[in-house]
Image (cartoon, helix red, strand yellow):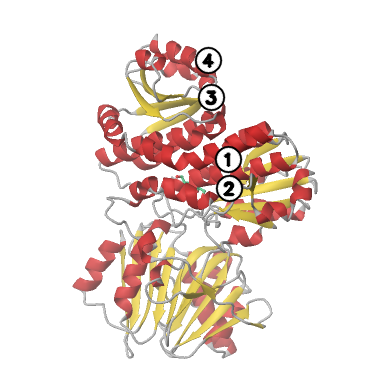
Amino acid sequence: MCGIVGYIGPREAYPIVVKGLERLEYRGYDSAGIVLYDGKNAQLCKTKGKVADLKAKAENENITKGNIGLGHTRWATHGVPNDVNAHPHYSNSGDLVIIHNGIIENYGSIKTALEKRGYTFQSDTDTEVLVNLIEYIKNKEEVKLGKAVQIALNQVIGAYAIAVFDRTKPDEIVAAKLGSPLAIGIGEDEFFIASDASPFIEFTNNAIYLEDEQMAIIKLGRDVKIREIKNDKPVAPFVHELQLNLEQIEKNGYDHFMLKEIHEQPEAIKDTYRGRLRINEGIIKMAGIEDNLEKILKAKRIIIVACGTSWHAGLVAEYIFEDLVRIPVEVEYASEFRYRNPVITSEDVVIAISQSGETADTLAAIKLAKQHGAFVFGVCNVVGSSIARESHAGAYTHAGPEIGVASTKAFTTQITVLTLIALKLAQSKGMISKTDFHKYLAEMEAIPAKVEESLKVDDHIKYISSVYKDSPNFLYLGRGYNFPVALEGALKLKEISYIHAEGYPAAEMKHGPIALIDEQMPVVVIATKKGHYEKVVSNIQEIKSRKGKIIGIVTKGDTEVKSMADYVIEVPETIEGLTPLLTTIPLQLLSYHIAVMRGCNVDQPRNLAKSVTVE
Ligand code: F6R
């Protein structure tokens, strides 16, 4: 969590750093700060609140000048969000200043040792401890900043992406990474540092992504030198050519990133299957699977590890894989899996699903699986992310940047890619007839247009949202492939509108949750024609007879559920395995509109951050 931005070059750093922080606000937004060096003085401005608050404060205090700048937008871990705990942090002498994304786990013992040597601390943060440790080493060992950073980082346990500046030697920034992402933009005589490439995309297409345990010494007007932190060896930098463009990271006329990303789904799904789904040749092309086909098909078990929405996509995949490939699947919360001494063998294939590719628990789960000899296949959106790099093989979702904190297009593109994998394996294993395979491919190709159609009933969904926006609770029910969609619908509603919501398998109702039903309780029931329709209709009757309010997600033209429900939202017909790609859409829109109507900050819900790089 937290976003960091730095600039060193001939331009004014302030607008670059502030704009960069705005783009990184999805990573944390409880406080923000900036430090600028104008050739003589370093000026610091920090505040509780969002980047907009920082901007107002900095401009009011005239802290806008300088060609070197570091900025930070925070998601608090150590110390409450307030002005003092906000980054950047100075060292005791005031010479060094740092921004940090991550957690220094052994900061307590380091702090005590530094206090014994006379150091004092203003904030409750682990970061202030780190900058003082660097200063202590720099003075004691009489070394340059880069060396002091290297020695200090060998003493800390935890995760970090940092940038440090020394005002007594103001021609360099030292950056380092372990566990948290860090990109360095390479311009002409200028350099950018950021948690992802979005802050510098209009200035350069060239970026170095630091690997774990690497540091960079970035010299004004000169170059970037990369070294390994453990053994101080130089590393030849690999410069990536970025595929990002400005349009992808701006709202483009939508009120919120979440709404934009909901509407991007038809294109995003196409981008996911483009080049892979080859109807004319009757094949699915996926190098990551083809290169490892034998190993994957021989798997005794597939274990899916993920968190949050990605975990829900994993649950959908469990249905698809068991249905089509007949390999047993277990879906695990990465956070539980990593700490419960799971049984993993070299005959297991572990699929890690993550939009960001940086989720700490998922990353730890795959490291554990690798230690036990399992083959790890990553399904990520962010190219070059830690999980993508840590996996033996993988497939990208190609959804484009997802900036809204609530995952939308990541979910549907994850399901798309997982379905392609299942189909590819089923075909290779001879588990699916040519006709059924072809039918699936044709239907998959038709999905973007059907998603488009599902988006057209937005006004109707808006109306339903206005009816139920003040309900304190919601239930979401689904069966089979649509049970994970019910969980996802409930998660979307609670995370952005703060309404309590639960997702359940529809048949589980009578084992407890039915006690909650009364005339106040809206129940969203996914009741598409394909997928246990009659059973779900019976469940609807059970709710109806207890006076619950029914919002049915139904197949276009349905009359039976319509006659029982208070409202229905139609989605086009498709084959059962692909229904989640359509039934998810109205649930995303419903949560979006309810949140907007309740005055919630849709793109930056309270307490959350997009990329959960702490455990
Ligand atoms: C919910 C949401 C989160 C993420 C979860 C995993 O809308 O966005 O639940 O799905 O934090 O993140 P990734 O997929 O980046 O590993």
Q: Can you give x and y, in whole percent of width and height, for residue 384 in the image?
A: 57, 64
Q: Nearer the viewer, mark 4 or mark 1?
A: 1
Q: Distance between the residues labelled 2 and 4?
A: 34 Å
Residue at mark 3 = 479
Proximity of marks 4 and 3: CB atoms separated by less than 8 Å: yes
Vertical relation: 6 (above or below) 106: below
The structure residue drawn at horizontal position 31% and vertical position 63%, both measured from the top left corner, is: 51
Q: Residue 535 carries which label?
A: 4
Badge 2 element: strand
Which residue type does callout 3 highlight? Arg
Q: Which of marks 4 and 3 is nearer the N terminus?
A: 3
Q: How crowded is mark 2: few (under 14 residues within 10 Å), some or many (20 or more)?
A: many
112, 593: nearer the viewer = 593
Q: Distance between the residues labelled 1 and 2?
A: 7 Å
Residue at mark 2 = 277
Q: How far apart are marks 4 and 3 (CA)?
A: 9 Å
Residue 84 visible within the image: no
